[in-house]
Image (tube, grey):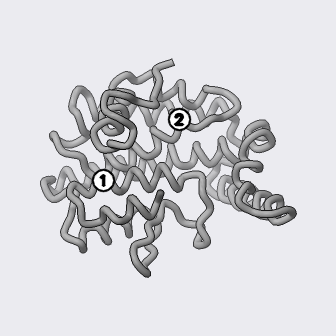
Amino acid sequence: MIFDWCQRINVSPCFCLIPAIIRISHWLHFKSGKVPFIHVGNQVVSELGPIVQFVKAKGHSLSDGLDEVQKAEMKAYMELVNNMLLTAELYLQWCDETTVGEITHARYGSPYPWPLNHILAYQKQWEVKRKMKAIGWGNKTLDQVLEDVDQCCQALSQRLGTQPYFFNKQPTELDALVFGHLYTILTTQLTNDELSEKVKNYSNLLAFCRRIEQHYFEDRGKGSSSIRSS
C-alpha cells in the first residue's frame, strides 16, 4: 500500500502523499529507524523534512503561498507537534506497561519469527525508554503526558479556529503532519481511550481530520469516515 501511494509523487496536490505515509508507517519499523518513509524507484527517503524536500524537487511545494512570517510560524507549530504528540505516542506505546504487554510487543514483533520478534521488541522498548530519559520524560506519569497532549491540542485548536486548514484555505506541511498524528491517535487501538479522548475534546480538530480523510482519501468512500466522536 505504501508503494501505491508513492506512485502519486507527481500528482498534485502532493498533500495526499505525506499524511498517508505518516499514518501507514507510524506503527512500522523501518531499517533506518526513521519514519515516515517513501520508496520511489530505487530511492528511499525517510523523515518528513527530507520527504517534503524530495517532493519539492519534483515541482510541488505545500507552503509556497506563505510569507516568511507564516513559514516561521508553521515551523514552530511543527516543532510543537513533534515535541509533544510524537513523544506522547512513543510514551504510550513503549512506556505504559499495560499497553506494551497487551498490544505493542505483539504488534511490533508480528512481522518477525520467534525469537527475533521478542528480541527486536525489547530492543525498541529499550531505545525509546533511553530517549525518554534523555529528554526529561523518563519520570513522567501517564497523567502528565496526557496533560501535555491536551495543551498541544489546545494550541492547535486555537490556531486552526474555524478555518479549513491552519493557513489560509490550502493545506501545508503542518496540516499533513497534524493529520498524520491525530488520525493515528483517533484510530489506533490502545488499552484505553484516554489519549484519543484528549483529541476529541476539540471539535474543530475532529472536523479537520474528517475533512482531510474524506477529501484526500478516495478509497475510504465519499461521505464516510473511520473517525468517531465517541
Residue 173 circle label? 1
Which numbered tag is attached to residue 187?
2
Residue type pointed to by label 1: Glu
For residue 211, the mark is none
Q: Secondary structure at mark 2?
A: helix
Question: Residue 223 occupies which quadrant of the picture?
Answer: top left
In percent of width and height, residue 134 lies at: 65, 58
At horizontal 51% and vertical 27% (from top left) the residue drawn is 198
Given residues 187 and 51, the one toward you in this image is 187
The structure residue drawn at horizontal position 53% and vertical position 35%, both measured from the top left corner, is: 187
Amino acid type, residue under disc 2 in the picture: Thr
Residue 190 screen position, x and y as percent: 66, 34
**Residue at the location (65% across, 45% down)?**
91
Most extreme residue toward the top, as rendered?
230
Sort mark 1 into few (<14), some (14-19) or many (20+) by Cα contacts within 10 Å. Answer: many
> x and y percent of residue 97 in the render?
79, 40
Judge from the rendering whether residue 164 lies leftward or rightward of residue 97; answer left or right: left
First in residue order: circle 2 vs circle 1: 1
